[in-house]
Amino acid sequence: MSGQEKPVTRSHDRLPPGQKLVHNWPVLDLGVHPEVSLEKWELRIHGQVEKPVTLKWEQFLALPQFTDVSDFHCVTTWSRYDIEFKGVAFFTIVDLVKPKTSATHVFFKSYDGYSTNNPLTTCLDDDVLIAHTADGKALTIEHGGPARVIIPKRYAWKGAKFIREITFLDRDILGFWEVRG
Ligand SMILES: Nc1nc2c(c(=O)[nH]1)N[C@H]1C(S)=C(S)[C@@H](COP(=O)(O)O)O[C@H]1N2
Ligand SMILES: [Mo]
């Protein structure tokens, strides 16, 4: 690969069809920003797994930490390039709870009542994480702090802010927007 210049963007189709590039980071959610103190914060991970666990904040931070730079695309047509997220990789969560072979889907529930569903294979992508930091700063509550899900290859609505519960399922169930169309 020596002597070959790196591309300026990852690919010519980095901006999905119909999207406009923004340089700020808009806030998009149900308008509810649940105040969860780090003392009270818990992440319950259960369902079709061998070792269900409920993590307190310190336990979550004690897991191996992972950094990934990704683009952020909202279906309301804005995209933001290159946000550096830090947190716990989804594959680390998988190593921890050991999904059973019956697990096919993952359901994410948030402190604001939001939820999303994803196939397990989507979540197993090596860039998926539960982020607590963006561009070197603790995630603000507007952007889903204390912690949120980031699935870089999906539109941003698939990544739950204010994450509270992860359930491994043997079937698909509908998330917040699937129920409401
Ligand atoms: N808990 C929760 N997560 C959510 C949402 C929400 O309303 N509640 N909105 C989704 C949508 S549609 C988008 S585009 C992104 C927006 O994230 P941002 O506000 O940090 O830009 O969060 C997603 N995750
Ligand atoms: Mo969105």
Image (cartoon, helix red, strand yellow):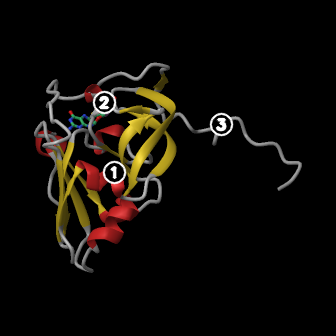
Query: What kind of residue is marked 2?
Result: His
- List the residue tagged with mark 3: 9
Q: Position of residue 148 (x, y in %)?
A: 29, 42
Position of 136 relative to 4 (above/below): above
* Mark 3 residue element: loop
Q: Quadrant of residue 41?
A: top left
Element on which disc 2 rests: helix
Residue identified by numbered label 1: 61
Q: Residue at x 47, y 59 (%)?
A: 126
* Residue drawn at point x = 44 percent, y = 60 percent: 125
Amino acid marked by disc 1 = Leu
Give me the residue at 45% from left, 29% from top.
Answer: 79
**Between marks 1 and 2 in the image, the one whose residue lies nearer the viewer:** 1
State yes or no: Cβ of the residue under disc 2 lies below 8 Å from any atom of ligand 1: yes
* First in residue order: circle 3 vs circle 1: 3
Q: Quadrant of residue 137?
A: top left
